[in-house]
Image (cartoon, helix red, strand yellow):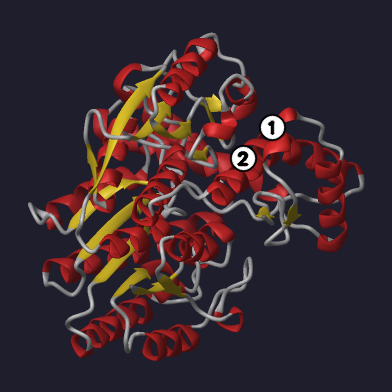
Amino acid sequence: MRVVCLPLDSRPCNLLFPQQLARWCGDVCAVPDASEMDDFTRPASFVSTRAFLERKLPGADAAVISIDRLCFGSLLASREESVSESEALGRLAWLAGLRRSWPRIPFYAFSVIIRASISALASGDLDAYHAMADYSAWSDIADETGDAEARRRAREARERVPAAILRKYHAVRARNHAVNRRCVELARAGVFDSLELLMEDAPPHGFHRREQRELLRLTGSDSRVSLRNGADEGGAIGVMKAALRGEPVDAEVIWLGCPEGDFIARYEDRPFRENLDRALAYAGVRATPGAKRALVVACPPDGRQGECGETNAPEGTPPIARAVDALIAAGKQVYLLDLLGANGGSFALMERVAAPRLCGYSAWNTASNALGTIVAQLVSDAKAGKANIAFRNERILDDLFYESRVRQALNEKLRALGEDPYRLADKPNAERMLREEYAALKHPLLDMVGPYAVSLPWSRTFEAFVETFS
């Protein structure tokens, strides 16, 4: 199986995860060369994107296409104005023409409904970031309810946003929404065999909600279009969908903590169960009671997901850990989705479970980012017939250690040197400090992972790249 993947951007979750998971199950995932990729705020060019697809589609069995990469050059670039609406729609028209040249290759597309707020590319952006988030949320509440207090709050928040940022924000939202409308039309016309509309950093209220409603009206009952929270997992889960070739995988879904996934995760706008059901359906995983593989979802027992540092020791952690161990002891192949906190895993949980016997682990960024990643690994493992322990170990080193412990310590030391973790002036020095932070770690869980290397993919500390060596 040879899948061509146009990734969302150059971060490991988007560029490397699809390759790693495809390789594990014996498939090939073709991605652009390094010279054709973006780098942090520098987008990839459409010329390189077009050349990549024209070069790699001959002989491919499927294509997984990030619309934001195609139209804008990367996820971050999709929040900028460098590409006009007419240019973006022209690139979609080019893709439709390319599909007509390869009618027997399925095209699986995914496109992002832009976040509620703006990018925070430096610490100085945070005031505008929070003001824009408030403006978006209160505007949506006011539109839904007609409440005068909500309108007052929306006006106050709007006044806190610099005029140039506000103008750009609305222009970019309108352009991206036009692109998503066209994507739905292309899916309904059969140009895309499937289209995932993914919502990044989308709280329960915001301008994205009215866009969702319009897109769903345009979609109608067409099953080729699905909508859920997420973004950075879109490429990995899409490549695994392609690799299955329509053959389903069975897995039992087991909820621990908050019953039946009845909670709305931080940075998301709908009950998590809805996101899980749609991710499984898209990937080709059947929720099957009694299946040997188990997707175990550790939810916040009180139904409120805070940041990982705020929820590392919830009251319900010990019974969740005992339940996980009981499933392992019963012979289940356990894939643990740790949602006790956002943006990182729970040491209180992982220190209590039989971690070396887990088949998979995921806990990074938003709940749906973590969900899509572990579902993709489960599919890859099912096709391979064995668990990808190296991938699991990398997730423990990254999602648990980096996200929940190392990053905070690293940021504090960088700030003491006058560095901005959102935009590093001296990336090599930050990477040296990162390696020192890992070298200083003393924890029993590290005994199971073996040798590894760590680096920063971009000139910021929001994400790390962890690679193990077996």
Q: Is residue 305 visible?
A: yes
Specify the farthest residue to the left: 221
Name the amino acid, label 1. Answer: Leu
239 relative to 266, above or below: below
Image point (12%, 66%), residue name: 188
Where, by quadrant of the figure, is residue 449 drawn?
top right
Instruction: Give the residue pinned by disc 1.
Output: 445
Image point (30%, 59%), residue name: 241
Query: Which mark is first along the chain, 1 or 2?
Result: 2
Give yes or no for contact between labels 2 and 1 (Cβ–Cβ under 8 Å). Answer: yes
- Mark in front: 2 vs 1: 1
* Depth check, front residue: 435 or 49: 435
Of the 4 image quadrants, the one containing the N terminus is bottom left
Q: How many marks?
A: 2
Instruction: Give the residue pinned by disc 2.
Output: 396
x%, y% of residue 312? 61, 21
Name the amino acid, label 2. Answer: Ile
466 relative to 311, above or below: below
305 relative to 45, above or below: above
Specify the farthest residue to the right: 417
Of the 4 image quadrants, the one containing the C terminus is bottom right
Local packing at callout 2 (Cα closer than 10 Å; few below 14, some 14-19, many 20+) is: many
* Depth check, front residue: 127 or 201: 201
Image point (57%, 39%), residue name: 130
Secondary structure category for the residue under label 2: helix
Cα distance between the residues tagged 2 and 1: 9 Å
x%, y% of residue 423? 74, 57
x%, y% of residue 438? 80, 43
Image point (29%, 64%), residue name: 242
Side of 43 where 200 appears, left or right: left
x%, y% of residue 382? 35, 50
